[in-house]
Image (tube, grey):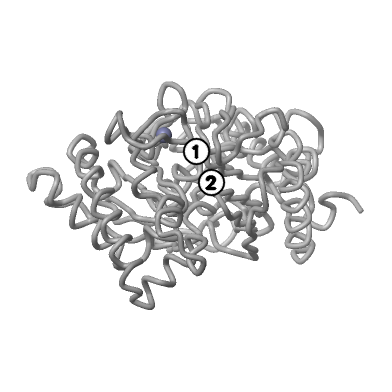
């Protein structure tokens, strides 16, 4: 048996129990090398904090069947807020990422205070339908670079108001910590969690909707880059003399292929948003199909270079345009054509399996990692006796 000295604190034990999916007390003694008295005392604190439970019975091998100590996630939920360029999905997720309630809203303008008010109202409404559950954290995805060490966001045209304390506001309103990630990276993480096991080494997740961006997940970890900008492929310069981009540069990929650029260039009253584009493709509108095909081919070619460099096992196409079957298949075809067979031979290319929920599932995983990390759990358990429960009761969120 592997000895895990790091698993000996209560928080470390919880992590071991979560990672393994549950162990018997006997297994825990063997795997941690702890004394029975110390182990049982720490398990007792985790039980009193509502973090673990003993249930079921391991398959009997002759002796007395033993109960399994497992993570108690039955009463815990995450509030996931996935903000895109033009829409925002608010959802309540079980800790396995399952959807317990959701609402999609259109972002109206750039006023982050108004958006926060609207999201808080919807979040409270969804949570109020889940009495007895506890919200352990808020996951927030934003269409902007997010710095790795601080979770700080940088202003972009899709989320310009950096003075407004979005994270602090949400944390205050729901009484729990807020974990922030870039929206394309949350999407990539969510999809990586349901990908084929052989493909999990490097996962690329493309969010192709009003904007275009990518998330890169390596060995289960989201790559954020030195400045928090990893995956911002929309601003790859195709032509330094090309049309001006809202980022201040010229000839960026997004100016040729994004849903926003397509809507602008088509200039049609009946195609005013990315939803209209997808619908027009479904209806085989020849002008829109041709424009979307041209854009997807160009984006696919750019992805070929990234596939060649990153050697991914899985490439996922998400977002309102990216997960459209015609677009996903074109992107895959071009990414294959513009990378070598030796690299992409075993790569799985596919539309997002979780549909519009990829980001919420990724956010749930991020909140679990942050909220249930050993140091935080140890701090919580040491803060009072009896140990406090994690999170806020759903019916108590937001007060009146
Ligand atoms: Zn740009």
- Is 372 on the left-hand or right-hand side of 48? left
Name the residue carrying label 1: 29
Name the residue carrying label 2: 25
Which structural element holds mark 1?
A: helix
- Is 278 on the left-hand or right-hand side of 345? right
Q: Where's residue 93, x and y in %?
A: 60, 58
Relative height, residue 44 to residue 162 (above, below): below
Farthest residue to the bottom: give it: 283
Q: Where's residue 335, x and y in %?
A: 20, 50
Instruction: Work out whether residue 48 can be spotted.
Output: no
Instruction: Work out whether residue 334 can be spotted.
Output: yes
Rate crowding at label 1 as few (under 14), some (14 to 19) or many (20 or more) other CA atoms within 10 Å.
Answer: some
Q: Residue at x 79, y 62 (%)?
A: 128
Q: Residue at x 54, y 30 (%)?
A: 8
Which structural element holds mark 2?
A: helix
The answer to which of 321 and 271 lies nearer the viewer is 271
Q: Residue at x 45, y 57 (%)?
A: 263
In the picture, the quarter occupied by the N terminus is: top left
- Say whether mark 1 is within 8 Å of ligand 1: no
Look at the numbered discs 1 and 2 and tell me whether their residues touch, using CB distance below 8 Å.
Answer: yes
- Number of on-image labels: 2
- Within the displayed image, which quadrant is ligand 1 positioned in? top left
Q: CA distance from mark 1 to mark 2?
A: 6 Å
Give residue 46's quadrant in the image: top right
Q: Residue at x 82, y 58 (%)?
A: 395
Farthest residue to the right: give it: 400
């Amino acid at each position: 048996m592997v000895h895990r000295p790091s698993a000996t604190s209560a928080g470390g034990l919880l992590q071991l129990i979560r990672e393994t999916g549950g162990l018997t007390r006997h297994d825990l003694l063997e795997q941690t090398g702890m004394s029975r008295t110390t182990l049982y005392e720490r398990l007792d604190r985790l039980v009193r904090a509502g973090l673990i439970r003993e249930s079921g019975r391991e398959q009997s091998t002759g002796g007395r069947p033993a109960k399994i100590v497992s993570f108690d996630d039955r009463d815990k939920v995450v509030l996931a807020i996935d903000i895109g360029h033009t829409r925002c999905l608010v959802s309540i997720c079980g800790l396995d990422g399952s959807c317990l309630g959701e609402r999609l809203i259109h972002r109206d303008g750039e006023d982050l205070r108004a958006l926060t008010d609207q999201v808080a109202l919807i979040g409270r409404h969804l949570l109020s339908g889940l009495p007895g559950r506890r919200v352990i954290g808020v996951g927030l995805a934003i269409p902007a670079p997010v710095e790795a060490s601080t979770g700080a966001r940088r202003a972009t045209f899709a989320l310009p108001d950096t003075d407004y304390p979005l994270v602090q506001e949400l944390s205050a309103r729901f009484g729990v910590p807020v974990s922030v990630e870039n929206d394309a990276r949350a999407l990539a993480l969510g999809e990586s969690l349901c990908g084929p096991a052989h493909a999990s080494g490097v996962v690329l997740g493309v969010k192709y909707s009003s904007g275009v961006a990518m998330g890169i997940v390596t060995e289960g970890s989201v790559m954020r880059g030195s400045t928090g900008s990893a995956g911002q492929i929309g601003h790859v310069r195709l032509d330094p003399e090309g049309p001006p981009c809202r980022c201040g540069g010229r000839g960026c990929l997004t100016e040729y292929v994004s849903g926003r650029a397509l809507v602008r260039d088509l200039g049609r009253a009946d195609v005013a948003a990315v939803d209209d584009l997808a619908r027009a493709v479904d209806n085989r509108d020849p002008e829109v199909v041709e424009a979307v095909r041209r854009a997807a081919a160009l984006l696919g070619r750019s992805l070929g270079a990234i596939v060649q460099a990153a050697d991914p096992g899985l490439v996922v196409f998400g977002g309102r345009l990216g997960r459209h079957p015609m677009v996903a298949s074109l992107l895959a075809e071009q990414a294959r054509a513009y990378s070598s067979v030796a690299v992409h031979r075993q790569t799985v290319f596919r539309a997002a399996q979780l549909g519009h929920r990829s980001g919420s599932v990724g956010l749930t995983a991020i909140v679990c990692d942050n909220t249930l990390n050993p140091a935080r759990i140890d701090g919580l358990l040491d803060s009072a006796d009896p140990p406090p429960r994690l999170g806020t009761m759903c019916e108590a969120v937001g007060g009146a």
